[in-house]
Amino acid sequence: MISKTHQILCLGRIQRPKGLKGLVRVTSFGELLENFNNHFQAVKLYKAKTIEDGFLRNAKEVDSINFKFNSRNAEVVIGNIEGITAPEPIEKYKGLYLGVEFDEIQKLFPPSKQVYLFHYLDLTTIDANSKNIVGKIIRIENQANADYLAIQTKENDEIMFPLQDELVSKIDFVDKNEIFLHNLDEYVQAYAEN
């Protein structure tokens, strides 16, 4: 099973300057960029070969910046980098990723305040009826405007399970780090048959 500790969660990727006053366009990966205005110290710029399951792979830290969120239009976030007031300095950041260490983001945004999709990562999945442990959540995917949990089973198979309120029986983000899901055994069996 994959553990997310000490990995870099990708928040976005710098596209290009916007306008003449030092604003920057960022492709946002998730809903967290808006919430980092009070947590500048955690966000860093990285070069990375790729993104896998929402995490940067082969990431190398390039710089620390203070990124301020201004607005969002779908997946594009407009913001500014503290100290930059013209478009030219932004050019050196094009293509770099905004990221934060996973264990740091868990401390900054505990599930007791508000639950984000990243809180589901590494939860042990249990069928609510049979109490069978099925596996761990390794990523969350959005398909056709619905969120799905990618569960790596104990047999190292991967199944996609819809994240819907009516299918969630109970979640413990703090003590046991587990989620009880209705009909999970049936999903596992259906995947095994295909």
Image (cartoon, rainbow, N blue to C red):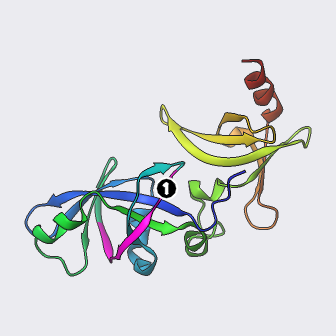
Check disc 1: other Cα within 10 Å, few if <14, some if 14-19, many if 20+. some
Examine the rendered structure and indicate whether residue 82 appears above or below residue 124.
below
Regarding residue 163, the answer to whether it shows in the image is: no
Q: Residue at the far top: name it.
A: 194
Q: Is 108 positioned to the left or the right of 159 in the image?
A: left
> Residue 38 appears at what percent x and percent y?
42, 79
> Residue 178 appears at what percent x and percent y?
78, 55
Magenta stretch encompasses residue 57: yes
* Quarter occupied by the C terminus: top right
Question: Which residue is the site of mark 1?
Answer: 57
At 60% from the left and 47% from the top, the residue drawn is: 139
Query: What stretch of residues is rendered in magenta?
Result: 54-69
Regarding residue 57, the answer to whether it shows in the image is: yes
Please name the predominant secondary structure of the magenta segment in the image. strand
Please, what secondary structure does the residue beneath circle 1 have? strand
Q: Amino acid at mark 1?
A: Arg
At 23% from the left and 60% from the top, the residue drawn is: 94
